[in-house]
Image (tube, rainbow, N blue to C red):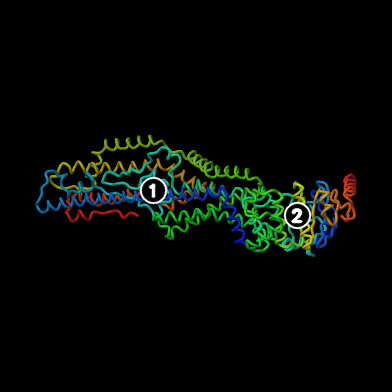
Amino acid sequence: MMSHLFYFEWLQLRKTWSFRLTALIVPVIIGYSLLLGHQRVQDQHAQIQELLESEQTFYDDLAERRRAIELGESEVEHWFQNPGNPLVLAQFGGSGRYVFLSPKPLAALAAGQSDLFPYYGKIALTNRSAMRDNALENPVMQVAGPFDFAFVLVWLIPLFVITIGYDVLSREKEGGTLALLQSQPVSIQKILLMKVLFRFLVISGIVLLSVLVFGFLLGIPIGSQAVIPVLLAIIAYIAFWFALCVLVNWFSDSSAINAITLVGLWVLFVLIIPSLISLFASNQHPVPSRAMWVTDQRGIQQAVNEERHTFFESWKADHPEEVMDGDTPDFYLIWMQRLLTNEVIQDRVDEATERFNSPREQQVGVISKLRPLSPSMLMHHWMQQVAGTDAQRLQSLDGEMREFQKDWKGYFIPRFRQLKYFSAEEISQIPRLDFD
Amino acid sequence: MLETINLTKQFNGQVAVSGLHLNIEAGEIYCLLGANGAGKTTTINMLLNVFPPSSGDALIGGLSVTENPLETKKRLTYIPENLALYPNLTGAENLRFFCGLSGLQLGVTEIEGHLKKAGLQPEAMHKRVETYSKGMRQKVGVALAIARSSDVLLLDEPTSGLDPAASNDFARLLELMKDRGAAILMATHDLFRAKETGTRIGIMNRGKLMDELVASDISHSDLEQVYLNHMKS
């Protein structure tokens, strides 16, 4: 009986404009969104590779020059030209290390916040800067977000589910076929359930098949185990919207009213509730203006610079064992003072940044609590987490850089304090961060 | 074959059908005449178990329609005033679909054969039903009854809106079904068709069966007079 009902539902459905439109457009937009996502991830991988290679070339070159000096084949006139100098290796020119957040295997599914937050940065002794070459250039995208699979799934697929399901029961009532079905020797509930189930399977099938086919063609790891929860989540999300279709059909006999009601629910769940939650969170925990934060930073820098002599003298008094005996080159004292000052500035700026970020974190907390009010918000957030492009992960770059900078300083500054130059061999062993 | 025993239906205290007793044998066409709201369609809906009777019972082939709804529906075919089929399926596809619901899996030749017996032109069988006239759709309904060899036919105003030729065609199909041994209950306003086609005629008013006549024993004009008298009472 199930196959009989499915077959004839298929005969009918395939002749409707709504099905033809869905079967045509859904694979195209899914394919296009995955293609864009795949290109974005490929670009990131290429960028990371390029930066790693340039970094390697830079230090190979320094090691080569240092080796020439060690062999007496070359001489340097100034201290900052000596590649063995810790400052040259850790601070000057192109020195320093890149820190990356590598794209996760399913990063192509959701651009998430990756157009707002950087995915790599560079640290040196006194600098820690995130690179923003992936920032948004198109102002329209700031409103609508990038065209990625998560956007297609969360925003557009529900509209196609509505297209397929808005008249799943009302069509029978309006067309008069319900009366004839009721006279058949099969439970009417069973017939209608099979019809609903078939339509649900059709729309789910179109979406899943599109994801699998295009994912396979593009080389996205859809065969991995990680993709199973994604496919289940897609089915669950489609089931939610299809259940809404059935619910609305249950209470209304008019297909036109059903269509309008369902579009209204789409607006509510996809647009209104997320906007209200966002507004509520920002009203509850307003973020100070960025201008104030920048002013604070400048104030800190100015205040610390004015006291830099005091810092240095007090440090010398506290660490007499670290102060070199005898004559020291001019740059030594200047840079000792600069490094100390920078340390204080960074600590104070980090504290100010923490204060600036605190309301934002509280906002995130409020949004997390209210997110279940909108399945669309839940789904979007979850997709970003799976793709590794959620704000929390991308913001962790700053922490990674901070931690690695501590290691970097711990490696170079003691050598600088003793003015112990690096050999060519040591240059090739400079530490690297094991990033994920 | 089809029997109602003191069949009664009330909606919010309003009596729609009151103590109806009917007994329709195989090979009989029983025409139920009555004005709008007389209780004809309510009676058919109770036979289909669309809603249960308030009291009394209806039997098809000796089985209660309320206790054995699916079993009794296997033995009947229902043709409403406007037989609504799936418009984007062909007549043949519609017939296959509804036959399948009774567990009948028929091939193309059999389907075409049944449609042909019901009088549907061969060139129309594989056209979408949305292009069909009402008469053509009714023929698909009769083809369903033929295919399922239904013991009982429930017809609710089947000739309403049909032109005289189509109405006459339909009457001949009913004769065919009668000859095949079906018990036919036809609710209608059409006194002429009831007299011409029916074996017996029942007249309903305000939910009650007012009179029962043998069609061959009464003339057209007498039937009209009796009908009008009952409507005035």
Q: Residue at x 68, y 57 (%)?
A: A188
Q: Quadrant of the N terminus of chain A?
A: bottom right
User: Which residue in the rendered view is the most extreme toward the left?
Assistant: A72
Q: Quadrant of the C terminus of chain A?
A: bottom left
Please, what is the three-letter code of the amino acid marked with disc 2? Phe
Q: Closest to the observer: A390 or B212?
A: B212
Residue under circle 2? B51
Residue under circle 1? A394
Q: Element under label 2?
A: loop
Q: Element under label 1?
A: helix
Q: Closest to the observer: A398 or A135?
A: A135
Residue A71 position in % (x across, y down): 10, 54
User: Which residue in the rendered view is the most extreme toward the bottom?
Assistant: B62
Please, what is the three-letter code of the amino acid marked with disc 1? Leu
Residue A223 position in % (x across, y down): 42, 60
Label 1 crowd (10 A; few <14 / some 14-19 / many >=20): many
Residue B170 position in % (x across, y down): 75, 53
Label 2 crowd (10 A; few <14 / some 14-19 / many >=20): few
Gap between marks 2 and 1 measured at Cα: 62 Å
Q: Residue at x 12, y 53 (%)?
A: A70
Of the numbered discs in the image, which one, if any, rests on residue A185? Answer: none
Relative side of B106 to A226, left or right: right
Q: Closest to the observer: A128 or B74?
A: B74
Dot 2: chain letter: B
